[in-house]
Amino acid sequence: MAKGSNNDGSYAKDSVTSSGTNNQGNHYCTRQDSSGSTGYHYSNTNGSYYYSNTNGSNYYNSGTGYAQYTSPSGQTSKSYEK
């Protein structure tokens, strides 16, 4: 899954409602889709990032080879890179 996408293209249809950088230097952004569902993401200074998508899915990437995707129905897939 590409960074900035939630695998079904809905990220491109979302509107950013707020964004900024917290006091640890991590970027955050909150979004809302046309139906009012909200989502957010964090991009951290350690290279990790996390998306909570408006469709109910979640995606985490450690920045060091581990990634996990959870579908809106709760099914989880994990990947490890060496």
Image: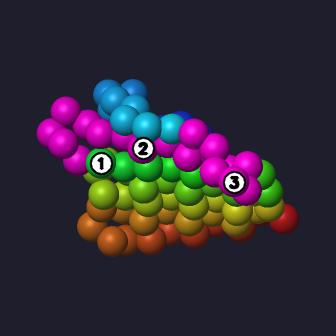
Would residue 82 be seen by someone viewing this image from the given angle?
Answer: yes
Give the Cα separation between the discs numbered 3 and 2.
17 Å
What is the crowding at mark 2: few (fewer than 14 residues within 10 Å), some, or many (at least 20)? Answer: many
Q: From the viewer's perspective, is residue 40 above or below residue 2?
A: below
Q: Looking at this view, is 69 or 16 the one in front?
A: 16
**Picture residue at 56% right of the left edge, 46% below the top:** 28
Q: Which residue is mark 2?
A: 30
24 vs 62, nearest the viewer: 24
> Eyeballing the image, is 6 above or below 9?
below
**Do the numbered discs 3 and 2 sit on residues whose CB atoms are within 8 Å?**
no
- Residue shown at 29%/39% (left/top)? 32
> Count of labels shown?
3
| Amino acid on which disc 3 is placed | Asn
Task: Mark 1 and mark 2 in contact? Answer it, CB < 8 Å.
Answer: yes
The residue carrying mark 3 is 23
Quick check: 46 above or below 8? below
Tell me the mark number nearer the camera, choosing from 3 and 2: 3
Q: Secondary structure at mark 1?
A: strand
Does any portion of residue 11 appear in the rendered image? no
Residue 6 inside the magenta-drawn segment: no
Task: Judge from the rendering whether residue 57 lies leftward or rightward of residue 1; answer left or right.
Answer: left
Residue 38: which numbered mark, if any?
A: 1
Q: Which residues make up the magenta segment?
A: 20-37
